[in-house]
């Protein structure tokens, strides 16, 4: 039972540690992005957004 619990915790940790921003959209970061942020164009709205 202890091994199953550890396996479940490991699976949840792995699933939640995947960076979703990488899958949300491509295009990379603009060179003028503020330090620590990644800004890119949202083609559906025509606006730049950062995260």
Image (tube, grey):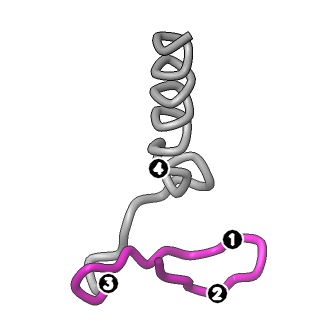
Q: Residues within 10 Å of mark 4 (few under 14, many from 20)?
A: few
43 is within the stretch colored magenta:
yes
Task: Classify residue 33 as left or right of residue 43.
Answer: left
Label 3 vs label 4, nearer the camera = 4
- C-alpha span from label 3 to label 1: 17 Å
50 is within the stretch colored magenta:
yes
In terms of sequence position, does the residue under pointer 3 or pointer 1 come before the other? Answer: 3
Q: Which residue lies under the disc numbered 3? A: 33
Q: Secondary structure at mark 4?
A: loop
In terms of sequence position, does the residue under pointer 2 or pointer 4 come before the other? Answer: 4
Q: Residues within 10 Å of mark 1 (few under 14, many from 20)?
A: few
Q: Which residue lies under the disc numbered 1? A: 43
In the rendered view, tell whether residue 11 sits above or below residue 1: below
Q: Residue at x 52, y 57 (%)?
A: 21
**What residue span does the magenta drawing correspond to?**
34-51
Q: Residue at x 56, y 85 (%)?
A: 48
Q: Secondary structure at mark 2?
A: strand
Percent across and percent down for residue 25 are 59, 55
In the rendered view, tell whether residue 38 sits above or below residue 33: above
- C-alpha span from label 3 to label 4: 19 Å
- C-alpha span from label 2 to label 4: 22 Å
Outermost residue to the left: 35
Question: Quadrant where the N terminus lies?
Answer: top right
Q: Which residue lies under the disc numbered 4? A: 19
Pick whichever, 7 or 25, lies toward us. Answer: 7
- C-alpha span from label 2 to label 1: 7 Å
Percent across and percent down for residue 20 are 55, 51
In terms of sequence position, does the residue under pointer 2 or pointer 3 come before the other? Answer: 3
Task: Classify residue 33 as left or right of residue 26.
Answer: left
Q: Which residue lies under the disc numbered 2? A: 47
- C-alpha span from label 2 to label 3: 14 Å
């Amino acid at each position: 039972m202890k091994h199953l619990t550890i396996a479940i915790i490991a699976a949840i940790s792995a699933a939640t540690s995947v960076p979703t921003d990488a899958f949300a959209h491509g295009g990379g970061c603009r060179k003028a992005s503020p330090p620590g942020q990644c800004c890119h164009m949202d083609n559906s709205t025509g606006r730049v957004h950062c995260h």
